[in-house]
Amino acid sequence: QVHLAESGGGLVETGGSLTLSCVVSGYSLFSEYSLAWFRQAPGKEREGVAAVDSDGDRTYRDAVKGRFTISVDNAENTLTLQMTSLKPEDTAMYYCAADFKSFTRVHVMAGSWQEGDFHFWGQGTQVTVSS
């Protein structure tokens, strides 16, 4: 049984930094994978933030490029999202997601990944950026 558990959210001022973590259990990240961070602000649809696959491909939504970094610690089975220069519009519930099918990795590599590509989801961690 695959389980994802996020942590690291909180309240931060504009321009501040946070690092989110997502521990993956029930599947080894030394095997093939696609992992992603999504976020959902109140009254808005969930949107993809960043994705990474086991081939090392990384893609980001334009709004976070240069500010957020997605990474994986295989030994700790953990997905991380380092967020810097945070803005009020980054305020949202952040979710990690995982999938282990080959064609999802193709989508990550192509930058065409979507919510429906990911089968496993965490419960979310809240990020609030004050202005």
Image (spheres, rainbow, N blue to C red):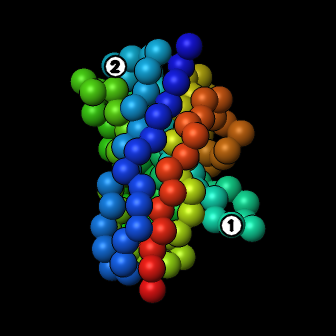
Amino acid beneath label 2: Phe
Residue 45 percent location from the top left of the image: 73, 60
Which element carries disc 1, helix, strand or loop? loop
Q: Is residue 72 above or below residue 30?
A: below
Residue 21 can be seen in this image: yes
**The N terminus appears in which quarter of the rendering?**
top right
Among the 4 quarters of the image, the one containing residue 64:
bottom left
In the drawing, what numbered circle is on residue 30?
A: 2
User: Compared with residue 49, is residue 85 higher up or lower down, i.e. above or below?
Assistant: below
Graded by Cα atoms within 10 Å as few (under 14), some (14 to 19) or many (20 or more), the crowding at tag 1 reads few
Please identify the residue farthest to the bottom as the structure is shown: 131
Residue 102 vs residue 9: left or right?
right
x, y percentage for residue 105? Answer: 53, 33
Residue ID at (27%, 27%) = 76
What residue is shown with label 1? 42
Q: Residue at x 57, y 57 (%)?
A: 93
Residue at mark 2 to residue at mark 1: CA–CA distance: 35 Å
Q: Please state the horizontal and vertical placement of residue 3, each as a whole percent of the image.
A: 52, 24
Nearer to us in this view, 90 or 124: 124
Spot the residue most to the front.
11
Residue lying at 52% horizontally and 62% vertically, measured from the top left: 61
47 sits left or right of 45 in the view: left
Residue depicted at 34% across the width and 26% down the height = 77
